[in-house]
Amino acid sequence: MYNPDSDDWRKNREYAEFTSSSINTKGKFEFKYGILEVKAKIPMADGSWPAIWLLGSEEPHPFCDEVDVMEYYKCDDSPSILANFLWSNNGEYNWSTKQLSIAYFKKHRQRLDK
């Protein structure tokens, strides 16, 4: 609920201002095997939720397989990167997730840049 005196950014703005974008390569680029390498700068401001997702092409979303290559948000007040995998096998859906802190990536930056 809106409260102009709140210290919480989610409550002290009467109206939310936001931007969004996406890149859709459906019908232009697909791959089944290989390595995906991404080098990106991401905003880490409160309220941002940058993400890089891959979707399967066999079924329409949300019924296709999905790989969340990277999602950024705060977990327990700690800036974190999450990677999630959702896949189906004969109609049964499976989910796997991994959370790593931004501090982990900064500590291992040289190894990750290779």
Image (tube, helix red, strand yellow):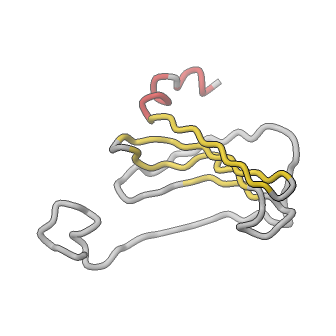
Q: Quadrant of residue 111?
A: top right
Left or right? Give the position of 98 relative to 37: left
Q: Residue furthest bottom?
A: 15
Q: How many marks?
A: 0
- Locate the N terminus by quadrant: bottom left
Residue 13 in the figure: left or right of residue 56: left
Q: Residue 63: x and y, percent?
A: 76, 66
The residue closer to the viewer here, 48 or 64, is 64
On-image quarter of the C terminus: top right
> Could you tell me which residue is drawn at 36 percent across and 43 percent down?
76
Where does residue 13 sit, x and y in percent of width and height? 25, 73
Seen in the picture, residue 105 relative to 24 is either above or below; the reply is above
| Side of 21 where 76 appears, left or right | left
- Expressed as whole percent of the image width and height from the top left, the position of residue 97 reads 60, 42
- The x and y percentages for residue 27 are 86, 66
Q: Is residue 74 above or below residue 55?
A: above
Farthest residue, direction left: 5
The quadrant in which residue 57 appears is: bottom right
Q: Residue at x 84, y 51 (%)?
A: 89
* Above-or-below relation of 62 to 92: below
Residue placed at 15% from the left, 73% from the top? 4
Is residue 105 or residue 113 the one in the foreground? 105
Taking depth in this image into account, of 25 and 103 the one nearest to the observer is 103
The residue lying at 38 percent from left, 59 percent from top is 47
